[in-house]
Image (spheres, rainbow, N blue to C red):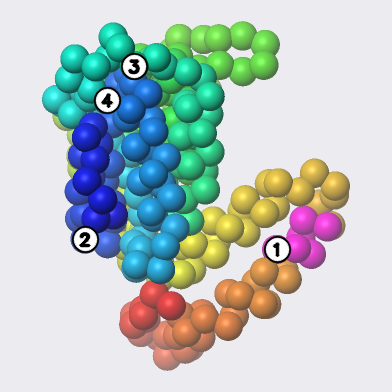
């Protein structure tokens, strides 16, 4: 994550990475998000336990600064950015503080967890129709994970991140991989279970932290994670 970006603001905070995004990102910001997402899947990022996509009105300061009207936005780059988010090995939490554009909502939906301000507006699409909902409505309909009053958003975000920070980084990555593996298998539940079991035996149980977790449980103590 050492690369310089023209539009993204990236903050490293206590085993997490926070990427500040505009509520209506342009093509340059989307392109840089693709690059940032790829950089998180490197050896130097193995100790990171969560990635936050922080959709914030203050991110307008980091947007194209006059290039908005000259840079053509395309749905292709938005899809690439969404794919880059889904490919991030760590759990991804989207935090939505303000009303989002349709493009930003696509990015939000690529996250693993979504925390939205109750009064934030969202444009959510499916194969049949497009709906505009508030954060609280989206939470009631199961379209986002949580909603909260805007002034409680930081507190809720930190509570979620503290829960993730208490876990092993390698366990978080492999858990996410197993969930995606099961979700991608359309053949049968049995085949999906077999693939997840193979991942568990071949990768999860070969890690230091898997063995440490079992020892800590049996010895009734807090685990000492090495995140490997």
Lower sequence index among marks 4 and 3:
4
Lower sequence index among marks 4 and 2:
2
Q: Are dots 1 and 2 in contact, CB under 8 Å?
A: no
Instruction: Measure the C-alpha gap from mark 1 to mark 2.
Output: 30 Å
Check the image and report above or below for 192 versus 36: below
Residue 22, numbered label:
4
Residue at the image position 77 percent from the left and 56 percent from the top: 192
Residue on which disc 1 sits: 196
Q: Which callout, 3 or 2, points to the residue nearer the camera?
A: 3
Q: Are dots 3 and 2 in contact, CB under 8 Å?
A: no
Check the image and report above or below for 17 versus 25: below
Residue on which disc 3 sits: 71
Q: Position of residue 100 (x, y in %)?
A: 35, 18
Tell me the quarter of the image containing the N terminus. Answer: bottom left
Instruction: Measure the C-alpha gap from mark 4 to mark 3.
Output: 16 Å
Q: Quadrant of residue 196?
A: bottom right
Asked whether the viewer can see residue 203, the reply is yes
Residue at disc 1, secondary structure = helix
What residue range appears in magenta? 191-196
Q: Position of residue 163 (x, y in %)?
A: 34, 58
Q: Residues within 10 Å of mark 2 (few under 14, many from 20)?
A: few
């Amino acid at each position: 994550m050492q690369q310089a970006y023209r539009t993204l603001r990236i903050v490293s905070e206590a085993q997490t990475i926070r990427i500040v995004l505009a509520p209506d990102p342009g093509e340059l910001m989307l392109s840089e998000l693709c690059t940032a997402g790829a950089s998180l899947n490197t050896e130097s990022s193995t100790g990171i336990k969560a990635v936050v996509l922080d959709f914030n009105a203050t991110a307008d300061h980091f947007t194209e600064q006059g290039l908005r009207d000259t840079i053509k936005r395309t749905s292709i780059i938005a899809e690439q950015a969404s794919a880059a988010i889904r490919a991030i090995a760590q759990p991804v939490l989207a935090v939505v503080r303000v009303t989002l554009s349709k493009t930003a909502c696509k990015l939000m939906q690529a996250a693993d967890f979504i925390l939205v301000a109750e009064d934030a507006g969202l444009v959510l699409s499916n194969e049949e129709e497009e709906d505009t909902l508030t954060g609280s409505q989206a939470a009631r309909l199961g379209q986002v994970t949580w909603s909260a009053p805007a002034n409680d958003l930081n507190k809720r975000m930190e509570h979620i991140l503290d829960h993730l920070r208490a876990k092993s980084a390698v366990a978080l990555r492999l858990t996410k991989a197993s969930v995606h593996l099961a979700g991608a298998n359309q053949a049968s539940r049995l085949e999906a279970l077999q693939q997840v079991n193979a991942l568990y035996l071949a990768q999860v149980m070969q890690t230091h932290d898997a063995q440490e977790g079992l020892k800590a449980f049996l010895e009734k103590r807090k685990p000492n994670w090495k995140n490997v």
